[in-house]
């Protein structure tokens, strides 16, 4: 939603879109702050009277007024960075107080991942189940073969967004190191696994959420060439489903490669009566 209304505001200057983007982005900031540990993002939050009735995965916020859900996945982190990028690009950088807040929040999350070896460490000191982007797990652990390309793409995209928003060179240093020393760019070439591997539609969405920012931000011709190869390969697999979002993301760098007519076909509108 943050991405959609930020893009809407960029095109239309609609004040309602602006306010919706602000409200939704600040909701994400609330999730980023709920745990009390800078960088440890909550999956969700509920009022304390509800949280107390839930399982131990739900933890009280520092002020005790709410409970936050732990064991945050790569899915959530992926979405936060898409929101960071689109909100920054079209709204936050033009508004001083929003700009400063966005910089602070993206720093907190990115530093937390970097300082923990590209892992999302939970409240108990253990890695969350799906919060991993480290070379050791992606390149050296066969159990995570299916995540090698997708999670490499995600971390490169996260670091690219962080460098773009903060201009801090350390994020570029980590980005370059993962490419030159740990083959993350080679991994990205196979971000979409093919038969006989499982065709995971959830991973398609996670991939394209990460593809969008990095494709807009990377201009080194060698790196960009590899990214284009990776996204073209991914799109080729999903194209028969006529996916609008995936087509639009791919079209930002390669409009002649995608079926834009299919992506813009009007679907069936279903109206629900309360």
Image: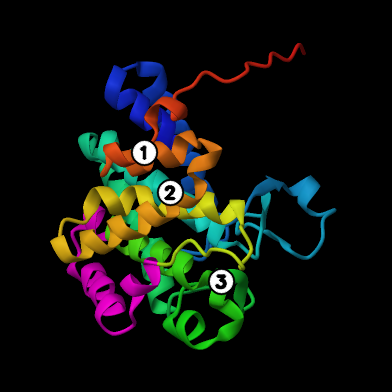
The earlier-in-sequence mark between 3 and 1 is 3
Q: Compared with residue 196, is residue 239 higher up or lower down, i.e. above or below?
A: above
Query: Of discs 3 and 1, which sits in the foreground?
Result: 1
Q: Cα distance, mark 2 to mark 1?
A: 8 Å
Residue 245, x across and y down, in percent: 45, 37
Residue sitting at x 51%, y 53%:
206
Residue located beneath label 3 in the image: 146
117, 69: nearer the viewer: 117
Q: Position of residue 255 (x, y in %)?
A: 28, 37
Relative height, residue 79 to residue 263 (above, below): below
Counting residues from the start of the chain, the first of labels 2 and 1 encountered is: 2
Q: Looking at the image, can residue 33 be seen?
A: no
Q: Disc 1 marks which residue?
A: 258
User: Where is residue 93 shown, x and y percent of the image?
Assistant: 23, 40
The residue where tag 2 is placed is 235
Q: Are marks 3 and 2 in contact (CB under 8 Å)?
A: no
Q: Secondary structure at mark 2?
A: helix
Residue drawn at x 42%, y 82% as measured from the top left: 135
Q: Tell me the magenta residue range.
A: 162-189
C-alpha separation, residue under disc 3 versus residue under disc 2: 18 Å
Q: Residue at x 20, y 64 (%)?
A: 168
Q: Residue at the far right: name it.
A: 53
Decide: few, some or many residues near mark 1? Use Cα within 10 Å; few <14, some 14-19, many ≥20: many
- Which circle's residue, 3 or 2, is located before the other in the chain? 3
């Amino acid at each position: 939603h943050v991405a959609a209304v930020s893009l809407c505001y960029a095109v239309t200057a609609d004040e309602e879109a602006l306010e919706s983007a602000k409200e939704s982005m600040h909701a994400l900031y609330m999730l980023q702050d709920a745990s009390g540990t800078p960088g440890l993002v909550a999956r969700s939050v509920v009022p304390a009277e509800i949280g107390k009735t839930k399982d131990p995965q739900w933890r009280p916020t520092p002020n005790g007024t709410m409970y936050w859900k732990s064991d945050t996945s790569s899915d959530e982190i992926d979405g936060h960075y898409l929101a960071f990028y689109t909100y920054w690009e079209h709204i936050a950088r033009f508004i001083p107080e929003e700009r400063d807040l966005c910089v602070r929040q993206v720093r907190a999350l990115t530093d937390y991942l970097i300082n923990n070896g590209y892992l999302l460490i939970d409240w108990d000191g253990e890695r969350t189940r799906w919060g991993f982007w480290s070379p050791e797990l992606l390149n050296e652990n066969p159990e995570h073969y299916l995540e090698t390309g997708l999670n490499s793409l995600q971390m490169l995209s996260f670091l690219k967004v962080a460098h773009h928003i903060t201009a801090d060179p350390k994020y570029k240093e980590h980005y370059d190191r993962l490419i030159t020393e740990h083959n993350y760019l080679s991994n990205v070439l196979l971000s979409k696994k093919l038969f006989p591997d499982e065709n995971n539609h959830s991973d398609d969405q996670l991939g394209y959420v990460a593809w969008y920012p990095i494709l807009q931000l990377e201009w080194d011709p060698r790196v960009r060439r590899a990214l284009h190869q990776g996204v073209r390969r991914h799109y080729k697999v999903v194209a028969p489903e006529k996916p609008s979002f995936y087509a639009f993301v791919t079209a930002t760098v390669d409009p002649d490669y995608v079926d834009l007519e299919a992506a813009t076909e009007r679907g069936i509108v279903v109206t629900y009566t309360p």
